[in-house]
Amino acid sequence: MGIVISKFGGTSLSDADGFRRCARILSRRGQRQYVIVSAPGRRFDGDSKITDLLSKGDDKSLSAVKRRFDEIARALGLADSFSFFPQMSKNALVSRGEYSCAKMMAEFLGLPFVDAESLFFFDANGCLLRDKTACAIRDMASRVPSAVIPGFYGRSPNGIYLFPRGGSDVSASIIASALRAGLCENWTDVDGLMSADPAICPDAICHPLVSFLQMEALARAGARVLHPDSLKPLMESGVPLVIRNTFAPERPGTYVSGSVRRQVRCVCAKAGYGLINPREKRVETLLARLDAPAFTSLSGKRLFPVPDSGALSMIAVFGLSRDALPKAIRPIAIAEGEDCIRILVRTRDSDAAMRAIHAKLLDPAR
Ligand code: ASP
């Protein structure tokens, strides 16, 4: 199979049991592998992600981070835990979640630790230097056959630079792509790509196969299973991806590849949209941020939804025609794209609309 890249998300590594679970998964392998880790995530509803605590950066939050890492270190008998320097930049401090997690995982697995600072390079504007990064990754792989590497950050001329939130997925894809890996595994807390968010639609099913292009469109439309920017590097280098559940590793997950032709049926949503008046002053900038500009209301009026500004949700439906949409949903506007239909609804109506659409997706004859 060649080199395998295994990325573990924050929920998979939220406590000592999570570390043990990941180690069990990795121990079933014989081949060369690079393990990419996120910072520990939430252990239960209402818990904090380590990255959120580090971003706050106050004494109370940093003590909570230290306690979390110390608990894991103690339970696993590790010497390494969380440490930081008071004069660290904000980015450097936030990156210590991934850094400490990778250090501890490396010690736990008995593998070398390789710092992401020595592999990922950004320019002063935060653009990834792709060639320099790929060379550094290949050079590292020629010397270190297997390693644990923190995700989410790299180095810029101004110090540590962070990928966007959820960016460890992107780190893993870039490593897989630079090494032309045989497989990139993304271990998370769901079975794979679901037909809808199971918290809203408990009868959601897991799709075994999806194409890169559709997975990217779904991730951009709000399917939270992967960072949308993580698909392109894999697509370009032809490295297949599998999304799997750390809590149910016997399940096959979702295989994402360039050779899949069939479109899968899915519905997902993103909240926080508002409408802008196209005569507004900053309209040019705002329109440039539109996901799908051609929205029309049921009365035929053009509407311009923009993210991060209001109480509307954008539902993306893959695999149903406009005529087949359930009558019960109350759309404010609809846009028909090549790959999906986008529906703008009030956020308070979104879950009910998702459930009605999902029922139709699973049983188009109803
Ligand atoms: N720890 C970072 C976050 O919470 C990056 C990641 O998990 O991929 O966004």
Image: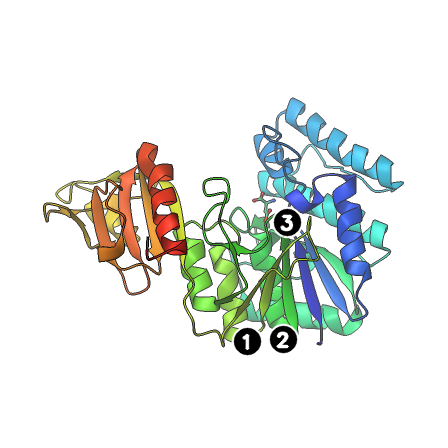
Return the residue at label 3.
9
Crowding near the residue tagged with mark 3, few <14, some 14–19, many ≥20 C-alpha atoms within 10 Å: many
Task: Give the x, y percent position of residue 92.
Answer: 63, 43
Place residue 113 in its image quadrant.
bottom right
Distance Cα–Cα, label 1 vs label 3: 23 Å
Labels 2, 3: front one? 3
Crowding near the residue tagged with mark 2, few <14, some 14–19, many ≥20 C-alpha atoms within 10 Å: some
Mark 1 and mark 2 lie on one chain; the one further toward the N terminus is: 2
Return the residue at label 2.
180
| Kind of residue at badge 3 | Gly
Return the residue at label 1.
238
Distance Cα–Cα, label 2 vs label 3: 22 Å
Distance Cα–Cα, label 1 vs label 2: 8 Å
Task: Give the x, y percent position of residue 13.
Answer: 70, 44
Label 3 beta carbon less than 8 Å to ligand 1 = yes
User: Quick check: 50 left or right of 313?
Assistant: right
Task: Give the x, y percent position of residue 284.
Answer: 21, 50
The local secondary structure at tag 1 comes to loop
